[in-house]
Amino acid sequence: MSIKNNYSEKIFSYGTLQYEAVQLSTFGRKLNGTQDILTGYHLSQLEIKNHDVIETSGTATHPILIHTGDVSNEVSGIVFDISPQELQQADEYEVEDYKRVRVQLHSGISAWVYISAK
């Protein structure tokens, strides 16, 4: 009997969710994904204060997306297939400076992404 994976959600990662250590800590597995591009955002940096997140990622400086609406702004990243439960686990990993929104990627894929909450 085969076990069906329920990877019905897509998440676009441009930062620490690409790190194997973060994936193993957050999801308990290494994710496989494909390259894609998000337009209308630019990449900035955020100083993380949460000790657990710093310990998991290995760094206190994390990238963060700022919405510009300018189609000439592009950010490269990876789209991962995850389960609804793993999406909730990603929410728990991200600090309050981020919010999750649905976006359409250059490929046409609709995915969740974490952007600046401000």
Image (tube, helix red, strand yellow):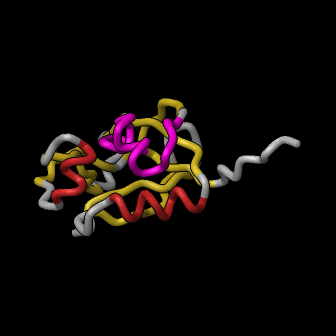
Residue 81, x across and y down, in percent: 59, 44
Q: In which quarter of the image is the C terminus?
A: bottom left
Q: Does the magenta stretch include residue 14?
A: yes
Q: Which residue is drawn at 26% across and 61% down?
A: 116
Residue 12, x across and y down, in percent: 45, 46
Q: Which residue in the rendered view is the most extreme toward the right?
A: 1
Q: Is residue 32 left or right of residue 116?
A: right
Front residue (pair 24, 46) = 24
Query: The magenta stretch spans which residues?
Result: 13-31
Q: Residue at x 78, y 47 (%)?
A: 4
Q: Which residue in the rendered view is the most extreme toward the top?
A: 35
- Rendered position, 3 above or below 85: above
Residue 94, x across and y down, in percent: 32, 60
Task: Name which quarter of the figure residue 2 lies in.
Answer: top right
Q: Does the magenta stretch include residue 94?
A: no
Front residue (pair 90, 52) = 52
Q: Is residue 53 left or right of residue 7?
A: left
